Amino acid sequence: MATIFTKIIKGEIPSYKIAENEYCYAFLDISPLEKGHTLVVPKQEVDYIFDLDDKTLCELHLFSKRIAKAIQKTIPCPKVGMAVIGLEIPHAHIHLVPLHEVGDLDFKREKKVLTPEDFKAIAANIASNLEK
């Protein structure tokens, strides 16, 4: 059975898409730790990130770097943090979170509540800041 991320990639479930390429898909997390919290997933459905083939793993990280730079241009923050947890959904993914302090990457803390309009604007702004 396809994961929720595969359904998002295929357009079966809506998302606040930022970008995609042949290997990866990036979209806003709907339960964000911070405004701009983005998920980057490989299009290949593999549960554990280190089970990805080398080409896909490299592409995932290079794509994440490009997205992180766009996030930082959009959401003023000293750094964009990266986390790979992968326990909640059996599809490898990277969390990119704007950081102001160490606690911003604490997944146990309360999530931000944003409106659909907020999500749309943030996704569009990050997408517009992607380097070509």
Image (tube, grey):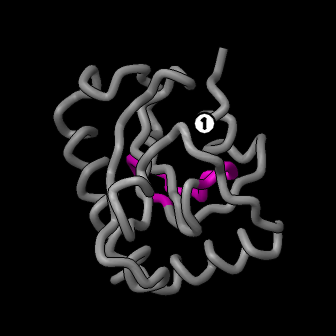
Instruction: Tell me, yes or no, whether the highlighted magenta stretch contains residue 31.
Output: yes
Residue 96 placement, left or right of 66: right
Residue at 55%, 63% in the rendered image = 34
- Residue 86 at what x, y percent from top left? 44, 27
Residue at 38%, 47% in the rendered image = 23
Extreme-top residue of the structure:
1
Residue at 50%, 40% in the rendered image = 107
- In this picture, is 79 found above or below 54? below
Q: Is residue 21 visible?
A: no
- In this picture, is 90 found above or below 113? above
Q: Is residue 49 visible?
A: yes
Residue at 51%, 20% in the rendered image = 90
- Residue 94 at what x, y percent from top left? 39, 44
Image quarter where the C terminus lies is bottom left
* Mark 1: few/some/many CA within 10 Å (<14, 14-19, 20+): many
Dividing the picture into quarters, in which one does residue 109 lie? top right
- Residue 33 at what x, y percent from top left? 56, 54
Determine which residue is flagged by label 1.
Answer: 5
Image quarter where the N terminus lies is top right
- Residue 45 at what x, y percent from top left? 47, 27
* Near-viewer residue (93 or 46): 93
Dividing the picture into quarters, in which one does residue 78 lie? bottom left
Q: Secondary structure at mark 1?
A: helix
Instruction: Tell me, yes or no, whether the highlighted magenta stretch contains residue 126.
Output: no
Residue 27 placement, left or right of 62: right
Dividing the picture into quarters, in which one does residue 77 lie? bottom left
Q: Label 1 sits on what residue type?
A: Phe
- In the image, the segment drawn in magenta is 20-32
